[in-house]
Image: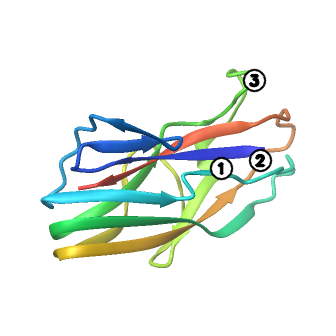
Amino acid sequence: MFTAAAANESGNNSSADNGTVRRGAVVQPLSLVSSIDVEPSSISLGTVYPDGIEMSYPNAVTVTVTYIFAFQDTLSVRATGNLINTADSSLMIPLTNLKFSTPGLSKRPFTTSNQNIMTYSGLWGSSSVSLSLYITVPPYTDPGTYQTTLIYTST
C-alpha cells in the first residue's frame, strides 16, 4: 500500500500536513496573500503489486491556489524523499518510482526540489491544477505501507 500526504506552504503563514493545520511557514510569495488547498489532503493508492509495472491514477489530486495581487506567481511541488515503509524505515521505494503529470506537463518523477506546476496572475481569484500520479513498485519489494509527503509551495 502506498500513501502520500500533502503539505502546503504559502505567504499567509499557514500550512497543512496530513490534514492538520499548523502555523509558521516562512515561504513568501510575490502575491500579497495566497493560500493552497489540496484535495484530497491524504491519498492512498491502495495495494500495488511489486511487479515493476507502472500504475496510473488520473487526476488523483487537485491543487487550488487562492490569491490577492499575484503577478506571475508559481505553484510548485516537491517530495520529502524516498517512499519509506511505515513499519520498517530501512525499507524504501526510490522516489524516482513516483511520478506525476498535469494537463500542461508531461509525466516526470517527483524530486526533493521544487518543480513548477502552474503559473497564475491577477488582482484576486483562484487557479487550480489536477495532478495524475504514477507509481512503480520494483520486483521483490517487501509488502507494507510506504509513504512520502508532497509539499506544495506558492511563490
What's the colour scheme? rainbow
Residue 14 lies, with reference to residue 75, above or below; the image says above
**CB atoms of marks 3 and 1 within 8 Å:** no
Image position, residue 21 (x, y; %): 41, 40
In terms of secondary structure, where does tag 1 sit?
helix
Instruction: Give the number of the disc on residue 87.
Output: 3
Image position, residue 116 (x, y; %): 35, 61
Which quadrant would residue 76 be assigned to in this image? bottom left
Which residue sits at x=76%, y=36%? 145
First-in-chain label (3 vs 2): 3
Residue sitting nearer the eye, 90 or 43:
43
In the displayed structure image, the side of residue 91 where residue 103 appears, left or right: left
Specify few, some or many for label 3: CA neighbours under 10 Å numbering under 14, 14-19, or 20 or more.
few
Amino acid carrying label 3: it is: Ala
Instruction: Give the number of the disc on residue 29.
Output: none
The residue at which mark 2 appears reads as: 137
First-in-chain label (2 vs 1): 1
**CB atoms of marks 3 and 2 within 8 Å:** no
For residue 107, say whether it is visible.
no
Residue 47 lies, with reference to residue 93, above or below; the image says below
Which quadrant would residue 33 be assigned to in this image? bottom left
**CB atoms of marks 2 and 1 within 8 Å:** yes
Amino acid carrying label 1: it is: Asn
The residue at which mark 1 appears reads as: 97
Which residue sits at x=42%, y=44%? 16
